[in-house]
Image: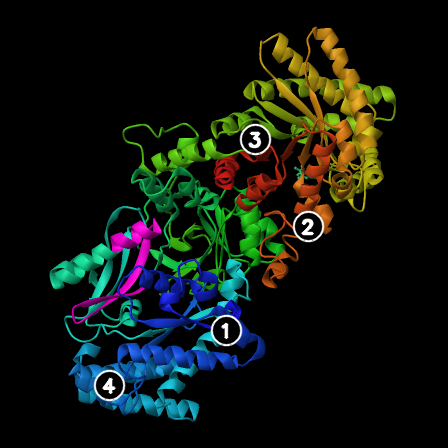
Amino acid sequence: KPASEKFVYDFAEGNKDLKELLGGKGANLAEMTNLGLPVPPGFTITTEACRRYLDSGAQPTALRDEVGSHLAALEQRMGKKLGQADDPLLVSVRSGAKFSMPGMMDTVLNIGLSDDSVHGLAGQAGDERFAWDSYRRLIQMFGETVLGIDGELFSGALEAARNRHDAASDVELSAEQLRELVEEFKGIVTRETGRDFPQEAREQMDLAVRAVFDSWNGARARLYRRQERIPHDLGTAVNICSMVFGNLGPDSGTGVAFTRDPASGQQGVYGDYLQNAQGEDVVAGIRNTVPLAELERLDKPSYDRLLDIMETLETHYKDLCDIEFTIERGTLWMLQTRVGKRTAAAAFRIATQLVDQGVIDEAEALQRVNGTQLAQLMFPRFASEARTDTIGRGIAASPGAAVGKAVFDSYTAIKWSRSGERVILVRRETNPDDLDGMLAAEGILTSRGGKTSHAAVVARGMGKTCVCGAEELEVDTKRRQLTTAAGTVVEEGDTLSIDGSSGRVYLGEVPVVPSPVVEYFEGRTHAGADDADELVRAVHRIMAYADRMRRLRVRANADNAEDALRARRFGAQGIGLCRTEHMFLGERREMVERLILADTGSERDSALTGLLPQQRQDFVELFEAMDGLPVTVRLLDPPLHEFLPDITELSVRVALAESRQDHNENDLRLLQAVHRLHEQNPMLGLRGVRLGLVIPGLFTMQVRAIAEAAAERRVASGGDPRVEIMIPLVGTVQELELVRDDAERVIAEVEETYGTELHLALGTMIELPRAALTADQIAESADFFSFGTNDLTQTVWGFSRDDVEASFFTAYLEKGIFGVSPFETIDKDGVGSLVRDAVRAGRATRPDLKLGVCGEHGGDPESVHFFHEAGLDYVSCSPFRIPVARLEAGRAAA
Ligand code: PEP
Ligand code: MG
């Protein structure tokens, strides 16, 4: 049969690399089977069968037959038939998608039990009680998950039975009492569904399989996939596994285990065990488990065997594994394993431990961690992790630790923060009107919405701590209070602490400590010190692997010496973007105003002459901080109106003055200028290279300041400035040529004056589609390209980068149009394809063309991999993201 027509795989036919087809659980059951580990025999129905069923609404006809023949083979092997009256084969039916997913139907155990076969099971096991207990579990699980009956009806009846019979736990109910309960459960099924509980074993199995398929499209599963960006068309596999019983008496039981501590990475015996129980008892927390180490005392042979198997699994998977197992009358069975989830800190520790043990090499170690985890480790955190005064828990939407007074509307957030208070903005959910309040707050807490809610998306964009969807908190914005599940009322002004990495919410102030990883990058602690944190040592080593491995260089976006120095400490190999407009703020704004208002050439020249020494000094400091490393200085980019007062404020001021007949000449001229410069679409207006071409002397002044600063550093201080001048928003090579000619003239003059050669490079940003499309021509006149993927994304998509995140992106994310904002992660198909083509075209013209990126994407993990593949020379990002970019560049090359 062609692979796609084969819908069922025996466990012995699969392997761990077939997760797409067999789901994670099925692929790993197959792998364990083939490793010779004790897995109860069974088979897996593929995700392809599920997809076909979901597409057509009916199970493929071939599937029924194929399941039939696999079942027959299983029956033969086990020497008994499914549901056979005197000695029934029982099976479990369990879902298993490629990614584990809450909200999907999970497991139905004991399929094959009926009014007849329950007696057979009792006879075979020599245990009446066990048989009736298994039957009542089947009806309960089947009723809840397959037939969709409210679970409370069953658990309520069970509790009533316990009370009636004075039983402290289920184990104390007798066979007879359980038999009565089974009757009661069957009554619930008939009453709730209008049908009797199905007695035919194959029908039970088929209904359960169908319920697993259907659960793929359950509301909670769909929501989870949207939030986690898992495609909706993967489908789930179904595992049918012969039952083994952990509830056959004290020599039976069930448990979970980890091959190492998922929190610290330490090797050892971690897990929980529950005697005389089936799996769901552990998960449901109905009875208390004992630490796994206790098993040694309870059943030494099984314990030793388990430890043996754990070692086999770790050696085989070369990683931390988590395991579910069952012991049936002294025989150990493996029910599941997978490479286990772990905390960010444990990921770094485990990766280096495995290198030390010789299990993996450095390249593989880099694949075991990622930049998102490193970023998590760089946030400040709350001092103690095991606090008990949690008042609620929501979704960890944007990391960090924030403390402040609770406020319930944006207006109060702004007012209080202006008067110096730290506030946490608490809302049921946020909307675009809350933007200013969110900006003013230390953190944001909402009771509704998931990872793609407005609050979550916007907070992540702002780098604000956010916990969203804390549903057990009742937020009442009218009364300005929130009520916890326990009934505690938090009033406006009470202090809250929220942990955006765990989603926990605390009442009162929890002390915040800086991240030890940041302390290390800052050079305040050393990985080699005797008392160095183990995590810091692990990060230090992993960063060294990444630096050895990577081809991409990493630069910083930095505009002043302080940021440049920090960037250097964090490992920056230069500056990829110095935005000179940031040097025109504060008191210099006035000089820029004079420049804009200048009516005559001499007025303009005098404004420029005033700016020149200031600019020069900025550059001297910057070049000193980055001595010996490249610094890309970008000439002025933003529309000039950004340097002028707000039009409404100014109009009001002028109108008020007029009414008082108090004439302010300057304000009037300013207002005229504001009107003159007003544009409907300033981002597509007079900015970037266009400014340089229409305002005489502006770029000339900047180039002169840069060249003189470089000359001063070289001649007066014996420094080694490596300066690159970058022209923004170029759309055609003619623009670049004009600016270039003028710049070369100025540079030659400065070189002449100082008697030195400066070797200044002149290049351009590629941030307009036309520039990308004509990159071959533009490269004629450019020593380097730096992709401005912020503007390139804005212009390729036609999305306003300043507005969309707050307006329709939430809806777009919810609808799955894209899984992540294209301003956050590069859109490979659209924007990315322009980048790839421009790289090729640019290098065709000029093979030594230097290529980098300085948009926000330069520090985004997924985008860094793209830039590596596209063949850029470097990425440039904000100083705090440099370690993440270094790590991801290493991972991309490993
Ligand atoms: C860009 O557009 O990607 C860029 C780096 O420039 P700016 O963000 O300053 O517009
Ligand atoms: Mg730009």
Instruction: Determine which residue is flagged by label 2.
Output: 830
Instruction: Determine which residue is flagged by label 1.
Output: 49
Find the magenta span and give its range.
310-336
The quarter of the image that holds ligand 2 is top right
Spatial distance from mark 1 to mark 2, Cα to Cα?
A: 33 Å
Label 3 close to label 1 by CB (< 8 Å): no
Q: Is residue 837 left or right of residue 226?
A: right
Amino acid on which the number 2 mark rests in the picture: Gly
Spatial distance from mark 2 to mark 4, Cα to Cα?
A: 62 Å
Residue 819: % across, % down: 58, 57
The residue carrying pointer 3 sits among few (fewer than 14), some (14 to 19) or many (20 or more) residues within 10 Å by Cα, namely many
Q: Quadrant of residue 281?
A: bottom left
Tag 4 or tag 2, which sits nearer the N-term?
4
Spatial distance from mark 3 to mark 2, Cα to Cα?
A: 25 Å
Label 1 close to label 2 by CB (< 8 Å): no
The answer to whether residue 80 is seen in the rendering is: yes
Tag 1 or tag 4, which sits nearer the N-term?
1
Instruction: Determine which residue is flagged by label 3.
Output: 555
Marks 4, 3: nearer the viewer = 4
Instruction: Determine which residue is flagged by label 4.
Output: 87
Marks 2, 4: nearer the viewer = 4
Label 3 close to label 2 by CB (< 8 Å): no
The residue carrying pointer 4 sits among few (fewer than 14), some (14 to 19) or many (20 or more) residues within 10 Å by Cα, namely many
Spatial distance from mark 3 to mark 1, Cα to Cα?
A: 49 Å
Tag 2 or tag 3, which sits nearer the N-term?
3
Q: Is residue 107 above or below residue 419?
A: below
